[in-house]
Image: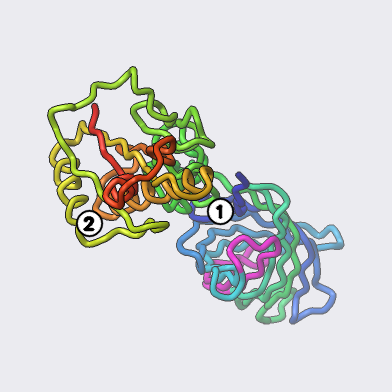
Amino acid sequence: MTTIVMAQNADKKWAVGLGGGYYQNLSVKSANGLAGEIYFSRYLSPSFDIRLKPSFGFFLDGGGSDHANILLEARYKFYNGKILPVDTKIQPYLFAGSGYLSDNGGPAGLNFDAGLGAKCLIKPNFAIYAEAGYVNGVKTVVRGDDRHDDFVKAIVGIEIAFGPRKDADKDGVVDSKDLCPNTPKGAKVDKNGCPIDSDNDGVYDGIDLCPNEKGILANNGCPLDEKKVTWLKNVKVKSIFFETSSSDLSTESTTRLDELVKIMLDNPSYHVNAYGFADPRGDAEANRQLSARRANAAVQYLISKRVSPSKISTQALGEEHSNTANLSEEELQNSRRVDFNLYK
């Protein structure tokens, strides 16, 4: 099973970013420098994160600190499952926010920023990112000149996601992606967290000791071991009968099966074994397969009426009276049937 995990998502809601790059003062072309930032991000929804981002600017000519800014931003993600897949490797986004900026160690005030960026996933909880943005400044005085410093900047950095991955049933698929959140312990699951049942016997792979052979829960997914069960000989269930070469259920058959359904639902500890038969005319292997289809038709009806598959086992016994010649029509009819025995 392969599980795709994004750097920050509903399972890892927190992330920290660290980046650096270049900024340019739009008011004074010579006033450029190096920019650094750190941010703390929180996942809100598939489309939005929120970030708290302190950032700093340092004059490129070695003149020391230029500005300091702390911003609260919203990040709109294009990889929200509507525009781009949530598990895309390249994850573009827009960001914008407001904050408080101090310029040239003096004047300070409210400001805002906006820009665009993209993350590239490297590992399940690690990404590199690149951003370009505009930073609105504040009024300042430099060498007696009044001006309003605005900036553009380009940043590259890393983002690390963290936080517990919730997996209530411990099947390896996190709760936010688990379509079957109550998987029994030990069962193998698919990418959606749903149990796998290779032989469709109601006992899940990983728990099923015979995963490629239909069995019963009472025997750990293996075929019924008749020596290890208690047969309920005092509880009689009527057989059902079939037309020649057919496995279709008649109205009379479904009526009898409804009686069996009531017994099973009223007695949760009961199990039933369905024995399929065919009359001796025709090829023996074809008749065995026909007897299996008849037993399975009965089983599917029981399941459709809420009887658990784990409570049902089948045996395809094929031809009955194969060594007897000149059978009557009644004997042939009686050979085309499914019998039921209850046990616990």
Residue of label 1: 40
Q: How is the image coloured?
A: rainbow
Which quadrant would the N terminus be assigned to in this image? Answer: top right
Residue 290: mark: none
Q: In the image, which residues are magenta?
A: 85-112
What type is the residue that disc 1 sits on? Answer: Phe
Residue 254: mark: 2
x and y percent of residue 69 in the render?
Answer: 60, 63
x and y percent of residue 238 in the render?
Answer: 19, 43
What type is the residue that disc 2 sits on? Answer: Thr
Q: Magenta stretch containing residue 8, yes or no?
A: no
Query: Residue 108: in sight, yes or no?
Result: no
CA gap, disc 1 to disc 2? 64 Å
* Placement of 98 over or under 209, stated as above or below: below
Q: Nearer the viewer, residue 283 or 60?
A: 283
Regarding mark 2 in the picture, which secondary structure is present there?
A: helix
Give the mark, 1 or 2, whose residue is nearer the N terminus. Answer: 1
Q: Nearer the viewer, residue 32 or 309?
A: 309
Question: Which residue is found at the position 50% from the left and 50% from the top?
Answer: 282
Looking at the rendering, which quadrant does residue 71 occupy?
bottom right
x and y percent of residue 32 in the render?
Answer: 80, 70
